[in-house]
Amino acid sequence: MPAGVSWPRYLRMLGSSLLAMFAGAQVVHQYYLPDLSIPEIPPKPGELQTELQGYRVRQEASAAFQQLKAEEKVE
């Protein structure tokens, strides 16, 4: 018995911990939307620009929404 608990309880806790870890990783992955594409030619030193894809998408959506609201006020 690891850590003084029964095997079934230990395995349940291990399984729930792994499930929580994988779920958290998935949430972070969906929030930041990383670019997982591999370029054919690697960039030269100093050319690599990192950007949060999810942030840009939300920013563009917010700008489009603001523009739509402004157009509705004009009419």
Image (cartoon, rainbow, N blue to C red):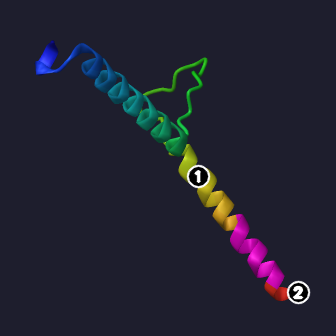
State left or right for residue 14 relative to residue 29.
left
* Residue 49 appears in the picture as rendered: no
Sequence-wise first label, 1 or 2: 1
Magenta highlight on residue 70: yes
Instruction: Assign the C terminus to one quadrant of the image.
Output: bottom right
The residue carrying mark 2 is 75
Q: Position of residue 1 (x, y in %)?
A: 15, 12
Q: Secondary structure at mark 2?
A: loop
Using the rendered view, name the quadrant where residue 7 is placed: top left
Direction bottom: furthest residue: 74
Q: Residue at x 66, y 58 (%)?
A: 60
Q: Position of residue 14 (x, y in %)?
A: 30, 22
State left or right for residue 41 relative to residue 46.
right
Q: Residue at x 69, y 73 (%)?
A: 66
In the rendered view, tell whether residue 36 sits above or below residue 57: above
State left or right for residue 71 relative to residue 51.
right
* Residue 73 appears in the picture as rendered: yes
Using the rendered view, name the quadrant where residue 33 is placed: top right
Q: Secondary structure at mark 1?
A: helix
In the rendered view, tell whether residue 7 sits above or below residue 43: above
Residue range corresponding to the magenta coloring: 64-72
Residue type (three-letter) at the residue carrying disc 2: Glu
The residue carrying mark 1 is 56
Badge 1 vs badge 2, beta-carbon distance below 8 Å: no
